[in-house]
Amino acid sequence: MAANNTLPAAYATSAAVPDWLNKGDNAWQMIAATLVGIQSMPGLVILYGSIVKKKWAVNSAFMALYAFAAVIICWVTWAYKMSFGEKLLPFWGKAGPALGQKFLIKQAALPSTAHYYNNGDLETAELDPFYPMATMVWFQCVFAAIALVILAGSVLARMSFKAWMMFVPLWLTFSYTVGAFSVWGGGFLFQWGVMDYSGGYVIHLSSGIAGFTAAYWVGPRSKKDRERFPPNNVLLTLAGAGLLWLGWAGFNGGDPYSANTDSSMAVLNTNICAATSLLVWTWLDVIFFKKPSVIGAVQGMITGLVCITPGAGLVQGWAAIIMGILSGSIPWYTMMVLGKKFAIFQKVDDTLAVFHTHAVAGLLGGVLTGLFAEPTLSTLFLPVTNSRGGVYGGSGGVQILKQIVGALFIIGWNIVATSIICLVVGLIVPLRMTEEELLIGDDAIHGEEAYALWGDGEKLSLYKDDTTSHGVLASSGATQIV
């Protein structure tokens, strides 16, 4: 009896289902991209809007929302190819649109990621995932977007919204694309073998350093806000944090560009490290401050997620626990102890401590990845064969050096680029809000408030008829006098 070689209808090819398309990989990659998008919107939109003082809830949430939308347009118009296209410079790709149908429906390819031996022979072929370019463009877009959203956390409650509107496309173009191409897109750090599985350097170290730098140029919040800045809704902060945590399955699980075994390893390690870090941070709060802090637990969760990111699919589970212990303690120490001792942390007002939760944790994770990267797992992901962490001997000691050098490049570039961008923007529009806006908050800036209740930030009219101010600024916009 002749064998039936006819494929089931679900596996048949067509114009919309070419033979190179892996439906499972494509489905997972689009889901992973959506999870990362949810981390920003509504995840960090909710978290920012609730963790700040009530009078800044709308402005803080809107800065995150605006950045998310603006990055999408800039990304598909020119920035994607600067990050993942043909090489222009060792650290930068050639700008160009990612909008045409011929480009977007062909098989995804990262043309600069082929890796060669010193003698010119091919070591690792370029990355050609089994799904269309449209999927790759969107997946990388949400990473770029969350980098700007994270950065915003450093300058909340005083950066002019108009200045932010200018800052977003400039930083994406002249800072983010450089790190992305250098480390991921086939640039010199990629070719050298610097390990950054999912953005410990490209996303977190860069946004943490850039945020701290921008905070320096923008200046501090008002004296009153620096002295007292209570969250307006801790429960909503937890809701935003929950979206951030579970969304990280897409953040780290999507970076093998395939629904494969390494993707599963990355997701498990992500949760192991985050949970460990949250617990350690909470224990330190209890030991030294006698009370477990919910906001502290959220900070510990974030530092764990950030720390594991550069090594999520490269380290073993026991290493993820060690990384969680260190990410729950070292950033805690830099924030809670060094942050109160060093003059630089007193002078630079980093609103949500993004330097500690993202820059410190991202750098820590990058160095620890150079220490703990397991050889077999490394072969599943990295272009440089025989890569390994320091604890595995061989070339592992050199890997730690590579991680440090890669971090120094990201740090140096972001300090310089962000400073130039802030100076340029400041020549066109003020970086800071006016003193009146700093005093009043959302109602003065947007004509809207988060809650229809009288509270801080509003100048209360003493008269029921508030059509005239009687010397006192009456409420406006959505504000209600009750």
Image: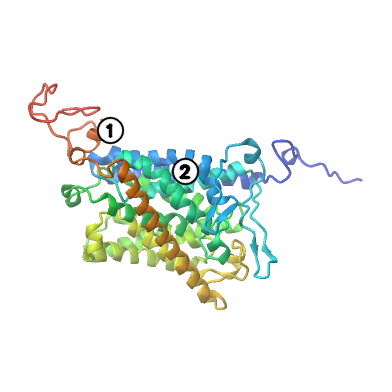
Give the percent coordinates (x, y) of residue 133. Answer: 61, 44
N-terminal of the pair, mark 1 or mark 2, is 2
Q: Tag 2: Cα neighbours inside 10 Å, few (<14), some, or many (≥20)? A: many
Q: Tag 1: Cα neighbours inside 10 Å, few (<14), some, or many (≥20)? A: some
Q: Quadrant of the C terminus?
A: top left
Q: Secondary structure at mark 1?
A: helix
Residue 34 in the image: above or below residue 354: above
Whether residue 151 sits left or right of residue 21 in the image: it is left
Whether residue 32 sits left or right of residue 45 in the image: it is right
Give the percent coordinates (x, y) of residue 167. Answer: 37, 44
Residue 160 in the image: above or below residue 345: above
Amino acid residing under circle 1? His
Outermost residue to the front: 427
Q: Which residue is at 25% across, 66% downward?
A: 337
Closer to us: 195 or 112: 112
Amino acid residing under circle 2? Gly
Give the quadrant of residue 122: bottom right
Separation of disc 1 and disc 2 at Cα? 25 Å
Write down the residue under mark 2.
37
Write down the residue under mark 1.
446
Give the quadrant of residue 5: top right
